[in-house]
Amino acid sequence: MRLWYRNPAEKWREALPVGNGSLGGMVYGRPFHEVIQLNEETIWSSKSRNRINQDALKNLKKIRKLIHEKNIEEAEKMALLALSGVPYSQGSYQTAGELYLDALSGREYSEYERELDLENAVVRTRYRCGDTVYTREVISSYPDQIMAIHLTAEGKEKLNFSCALGRCDMQTGKSGGEENRRIFFLADTGGMKFCVMAECGECDGTAETIGDHLLVRDASEVTLYLSINSTYRCEKVQKECREKLQKAEEKGWKEILSRHIRDYRKLYQGMELKLGNTDRRELPVDERLELLRNGGQDEGLYALYVQYGRYLLISSSRPGSLPCNLQGIWNCELTPPWGSKYTININTEMNYWPAESTGLSECQLPYFDLLDKMKENGKKTAKEMYGCRGSVAHHNTDIYGDTAPQDKYIPASYWVMGEAWMATHIIEHYEYTGDMEFLKKYFDVYEQCVLFFEDFLVEREDGTLVTSPSVSPENTYIMENGKKGCLCEGSFMDIEILRELFTGYLKSCEALGEKEEKKQAAREILERMPQFRIGKYGQLQEWQEDYEEAEPGHRHISHLFGIYPGTSLYEGTDTKYRDGARISLERRLSFGSGHTGWSRAWITGLWARFQESEKAYENFRELLKRSTFPNLMNNHPLGNDYVFQIDGNMGAVAAVMEMLVQFQNGIFHFLPALPEAWKDGWIRGMRLKGGIRLDMEWKNGRVTGFSVSADSDQEMMVYFNDRKETLGLKKEIPYIWKA
């Protein structure tokens, strides 16, 4: 599979990404003036700071009292003063700079093509000038932790170019050249110092440095290596760059490429799929998208999008790296939208929704590393802001695991569920992998979250326990007196997350053999959670009161968390609240929800859970038509333009997995939301809970064969083709069924 194009990228949103989890690049593919925009995951604008507002705790009771008395306006004024972080904002993730390749001659070219080879994680550019064919290949290697650019000229002419480094019109410190044909620059973000260094490796022509430029002449083959290091991980950043480049040069391009491909394929080749019978792969991707917008069919594009999403996750999140942020690792700005941070009221979580089912479980490990870091900071936040045990985080975090409120934004900043939502992924990972050592390692994250809510929850007159202050991210309600508000007691998203959190904690306690006292305390809190409510439109209420919404078509659909990705509203035999959730979704859509890419992806997953195959497909199609850049990156509206957010890519991939297999009430449902357009297809290597691997084929919407294998002996209940069967699985022995 590949993404290919007939023209170079004019804008960043058209460039093609490479990445190794830490080091990223956006390759424009320009013949004579190439640009590779560079990123390194640790380049952030600020240092670690204690931003906890020391006046929070002494004003907490007052804020809670005002909320309870429905004096929301005064409560929100006090929250802005007493709960906001000081300073109110975390730092931003920043671009590292750019690498420029400028040809010393040549202005016309033909037979142009550029591609992202998904099978090998290589970006290639190829074109002809006269009798000479020029090829450029770019990789970002995880085994060798460098970027490599390989250039060749086949024909009469040679490679003659200059190479330079820059950063947003020279937002750098010292720059220059070194021996061994190296160029570099140093920069200081205010948060950390870093070095960008490039070196000419193999070259059958001549290469030299002049000033801070590298000049290559009369070569038919050249390899450039690039390294970026910051003081986040080491103090001697130049020395670290030199050592990595020296090791790369000693290995050479062929070995580095071979190591890169072997490493990448171990992950990428773990899952394959085919959806439907139309595949317009003979067309470039931008033309395929346009075909879709004009009503054409191209089911191969949906499968390509899924595999591209897996490529993005492999390229932006690997063991030992940081987790992928709002833009994965690809960001071309010094002050990007929303700081390109970790937004943990859905976006960061959504980044990892497809990790387990698509065979990329290890790519989620950086997420848990960050969560562990947040846990320690969250203990301080819980104690100093709320007088509670345990650990808490709000709606954003950063490279340091900051847990204090971010921004002065009433609809989001003072929401206390960020760490709790993130923690629900722990039991999910365990249920897919059965990794007991993993569960032991991260059990304390669960425990600290549970301890926080044991202390934080407030009792209402009816004896139920609710969060306060809280919000329903990032929505606003209208009270009976016409006034608008955001702060509340016990939004129903909070209740749903708490049900998932405490249920996962109890499962973890059972698996680890924890003491009964711990489990009993958690059970008692679960029993005192408020019941969900149905409002005047038949909808599942978002708040305890049946408020009208200021923006009924809001992008967040927070109170449907319990349908998807959660299960608290999804499982069981009582459909009352599930039906109410469906009405809520229909109302949201009738007022225009889904206008952002990640929101559309979430809606696709929700319709899949409701087993509405055509509605799920329609929304995935709309995501491709309206929320996708030419390079298949997901977009998000901002002012009069759009920006990249990786969450929509990942959320859509996860939604496709939900369309193919769902697990509910102990039963695996095959093809629960298969649309007519995908009536024929197959998938190989899908992962299911229980350490199960699934290969499945279908025709005319019916399963024609499947093979399942498991990591342990177990029974597996499956539902397919209107029949239910119980399979006796033996460890690592495939169970094969054929129609």
Image (spheres, rainbow, N blue to C red):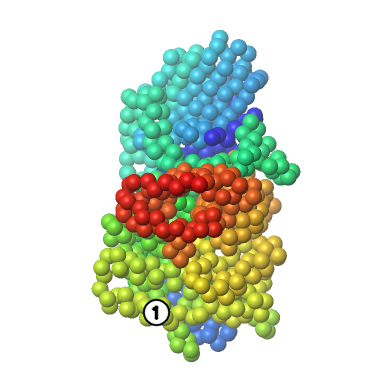
Q: Amino acid at mark 1?
A: Ile
Q: Against 549, is 306 above or below?
A: above
| Residue that mark 1 sits on | 525
Residue in front for this viewpoint, 159 or 538: 538
Residue 16 in the image: x percent, y percent? 55, 37
Residue placed most toward the observer, 544 or 403: 544
Q: Note whether residue 677 is visible.
A: yes
Report the residue that reaches farthest toward the top: 156
Quadrant of the rendering where the N terminus is positioned = top right
Residue 414 appears anywhere in the view: no
Residue 511 location in percent, x, y? 30, 65
Q: Is residue 422 above or below residue 72?
A: above
Residue 81 at x, y percent in the picture: 51, 74
133 horizontally vs 728: left or right? right
Which residue lies most toward the right here?
294
Per the image, label 1 sits on a secondary structure element best described as helix
Give the tally of numbered discs: 1
Residue 192 versus residue 557 in the image, above or below: above
Q: Is residue 593 above or below residue 706?
A: below
For the point 30% across and 68% down, the residue is 510
Q: Nearer the viewer, residue 157 or 335?
A: 157
Q: Nearer the viewer, residue 256 or 411?
A: 256
Residue pictured at 53% horizontal, 14% vertical:
154
How busy is the neighbourhood of tag 1: few (under 14 within 10 Å), some, or many (20 plus)? some
Q: Looking at the image, which residue is at 32% across and 24% down? A: 250
x and y, in percent, of residue 506 in the image: 35, 70
Q: Residue at x 38, y 33 (%)?
A: 262
Q: Residue furthest front?
A: 739
